[in-house]
Amino acid sequence: MSLESKKSLLKNTLALSIPSAVNPFVSLALVYVVSRRLGVEGMGQYSLLLSYLNIFTTVASLGLGGLIVREVARKPEDVHTLTGNALLFGLVSSSIAMVLMDFGVTFLRYDNELLTAFLLGSVALIPASCSRFLEASFRAIERSEFIALGQFMENVSKVILCTAVVLTGYGIVAISAMTVLTKLLALGLLLVFYFNVVGVFSIRFKKDIWTMLFREAPTFMGIAIFSTIHLNVDMILLSKLAGVLSVGIYGAALRINQMCVIVPMAFSLAILPIFSRHFGYGLESLREKTELSIRYVLIVCLPMAIGMILLADKVIFLIYGNKFAQSVFILQLMAPSLIPYSLVLILAQTLIAANQQGLDMKINMVAAAMATVLNYILIQHFAEVGAVMANIITIVAFVILQLLFVTKNLFPVQLVQISKKPLLAATGMAFVTYLLREFNMFLNIVISAVAYFALLFCLKGLYPEEIATIKSVGQKIGQRSFNYIRRRL
């Protein structure tokens, strides 16, 4: 791949990846307050609320964000019509999802406080799904910095409001109410960004667009729902089979793991419009972009996974305190799953860009069934450890199926060749991290990171022009966001 192509890919993906990586650190302030003021049970309630909202937000948006990205990337002149009709479509689908969530949580018979929080929180599905459609349009036109800025402002608002209500003595119901409020504020902010950056979308009903949305909705909704099930069924089954305390122990480790997932997640969201365009140039062009993207996520995720294993105790005790000691082993078990999960994200975008979303849905169906069965069996015997075991088995099976389908229907992926240099550099870093375990954790992380990238550079796993591009784009994103905020104020 040419140097210009590599720079283009980095530029378009870092616009979302770098700012989005900051959000989990902001969220830690709320996690810190909830875990200390409401205890393990309160942390379990909070984790469970987030799991239900994630599941039903996916149902509300029908997974159509990927479709909007793909279609706008191919026909950018239709962005206003597609966005407006998608928002109207989302208002209908999210209202139905809200009713489904209310019925579902009532049927499961949680205690009154938790049930009230769920019923109140379901209102957030409407602004959350509309926000997803607006974000899809930004992704398609490769202005992801506004998604990152919007999510950052939402996150800050949520942390401030929820922390305030917890510190004044309120619990999960108040947290749920503040979550709804921040979702509404976030939608308003995205609309302001859209009107100022993109223009005014058309809210005129277009039969051909609604026909396309209805036609593609079952497949994309299937992908989204089955994906959400296999990623969230662990929390729900833990709450029913092992209790809210187990959810708190497991959820504490999961929150740390999700901080690492945000980088490959943001990367995968940013590359779909690039993949969609390059599919039109031929399978060889798409293969190059896919393998380059896999190399980038492995470069980022391999050292994070190793770092989590070696420093899990320090991270858990720093954020949650000694009463979450049981979460240390859970986090260490979870850490390796970051690698196959990052591959799953990239290969899913490849299948969608190549109009193979039907295959992606079938794989997600298998994963959802595996996750449900394995979690149900293993949680009963091993509680939180069983949930981790179930998820690791599922995600490994998932990426194997993806590789088989991509190889059979599109092109072979040279995974072993791609992973050699990042794996060697991460192995060398592991020795440094282990030797410095008794040092200050932050100093250890900095020295380990320097050692890792030095080894990677020596092995020619990362090139000077890529490093220069990362630095240049990061500065440009920060300056552009700062200038935009200053103009608005």
Image (tube, rainbow, N blue to C red):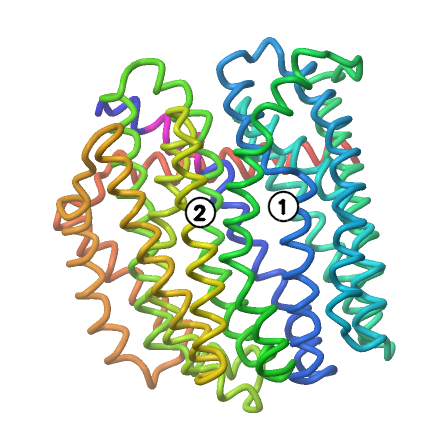
Q: Residues within 10 Å of mark 1 (few under 14, many from 20)?
A: many
Q: Quadrant of the C terminus?
A: top right
Secondary structure of residue under mark 1 = helix
User: Please, which residue is most extreme toward the top here?
Assistant: 77
Please name whichever residue, 483 or 197, is drawn nearer the observer in this view of the structure: 197
Q: Residue tagged by mark 1?
A: 58
The answer to whether residue 448 is above or below residue 78 is: below
* Type of secondary structure dominating the magenta stretch: helix
Q: Nearer the viewer, mark 1 or mark 2?
A: 2
51 sits to left or right of 350: right
Give the residue type that dot 1 points to: Thr
Secondary structure of residue under mark 2 = helix
The residue that appears at 68% across and 85% down in the rendered structure is 39
Residue 276: x %, y % from top left: 42, 22
Residue 129: x %, y % from top left: 70, 40
Q: Is residue 470 magenta?
A: no
Residue 335: x %, y % from top left: 37, 68
The residue that appears at 21% across and 30% down in the rendered structure is 411
Q: Quadrant of residue 236?
A: bottom right
Looking at the image, is mark 1 or mark 2 earlier in the sequence?
A: 1
Q: Is residue 10 magenta?
A: yes
